[in-house]
Image (cartoon, rainbow, N blue to C red):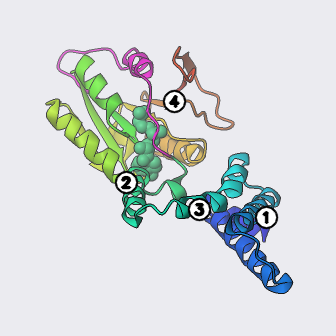
Amino acid sequence: MRPLLKKLPPAIAALLLQAAAVVLMLLTVKVIGQHESPLLFALLCGLLAATFSFFAGLAKWWLAIQLLFAPALVLMLSAKLPPSLFLGAFLILLLVYWSTFRTQVPLYLSSNKVWRALEHLLPAAKANSNFTFIDLGSGLGGVLTHLANVRPDGRYIGVEAAPLPFFWSWLRIRLGNHRNCQVKWGSLWDCDLSQYDVVFAYLSPVPMGKLWHKARAEMRPGTMFISSTFSVLDQTQHETVQVDDLHHSTLFIWHM
Ligand SMILES: C[S@@+](CC[C@H](N)C(=O)[O-])C[C@H]1O[C@@H](n2cnc3c(N)ncnc32)[C@H](O)[C@@H]1O
C-alpha cells in the first residue's frame, strides 16, 4: 500500500486515507452499535486518518490537515451556511490554485526586494540589442512588470498555468501599457527555453530536478538560470544572492 500511495500526488493519497478512516469508523460503529455524536465520530475519523497518514509517510503538515478535516466539516455543516458560499469559495480557490494538487507548486509571490535584486542580474544594456527574460510560473506578473519598467531594453515573457493569476497578470500588463511584456496561459513544461537569455523560476522543491534537466537540455551557453529559494539537489550554483526580505529569500544562479 505504501509504495502505491507514494506514487500518488499527496492530496490524492490524503483523500484516500481520509476515506479509509471514515469507512473503518462506519464499520466500527455498525459492529458496536453506538454513535455518540457526529463531532466525536469526526474527531475519531481525524485521529485515524492522521495515524494512517503518519504511517504512509505523508509530510508533517498533512497530519494536522488530516486530523482537523472531518471535525471542521462537521462544525461548518452545523453552522448551516448557504451551500452557494462553499461552491463560490471552491470555485475561487480552483481558479487561483488550479492544478496545484498535481504540480505541488502553489501561488506565493516574490517580494519587491527580490524584484530589485533581479534588476542587478539582468544582462548589461547594449545599443540595438534586447535581451529576453522568462518567468516560469509568473503568478500575478509582479516580477515581469517591475523589470519591464526599470529595464525597458528587455523582452519579458511569463507563463502561468492557473486561470485567475494569468488573467490578473494579463490585465496588469495591459493596464500598465507594458509593450515589452507578455504573459501566456499554459504549462512551463511546454516552453522552449532556448529562446531566453535569463530564465527565472520561483516554484517549489518538487519540480526542481526535472526543471534543471530541461534547462540543461534547452538553454544556450552564456545564458542564465535563476531559481528563487529552491536550489537543485546535487547541482552547486555558480552564485547566490541573499535578499534581505521577510522570507530571507536566496537567488540561486547558474551560468549555462
Ligand atoms: C510561487 S508562484 C511564483 C509567482 C511569481 N513567479 C513570483 O515570483 O511572484 C509559482 C507559480 O507557478 C505556477 N505554476 C505551477 N506549476 C506550473 C506549470 N507547470 N506551468 C505554469 N505555471 C505553473 C503557479 O500557478 C504559481 O502561480
Residue holding disc 4: 228
Q: Which residues are magenta?
A: 106-132
Contact (Cβ within 8 Å) of mark 2 with mark 3: no
Q: Is residue 176 left or right of residue 78?
A: left
Q: Inspect the image, locate mark 4, and give the three-letter code of the amino acid beneath it.
A: Ser
Mark 4 CB lies closer than 8 A to ligand 1: yes
Measure how far apart labels 1 and 2 are at the Cα level.
30 Å
Measure how far apart labels 3 and 4 are at the Cα level.
36 Å
Q: Residue visible at 60% across and 26% down? A: 237
Which quadrant of the figure has residue 73?
A: bottom right
Q: Nearer the viewer, mark 2 or mark 3?
A: 3
Dot label at residue 48: 1
Against 193, is 27 above or below?
below
**Image x and y of residue 193, in percent:** 39, 42
Q: Nearer the viewer, mark 3 or mark 1?
A: 3
**Image x and y of residue 159, in percent:** 34, 45
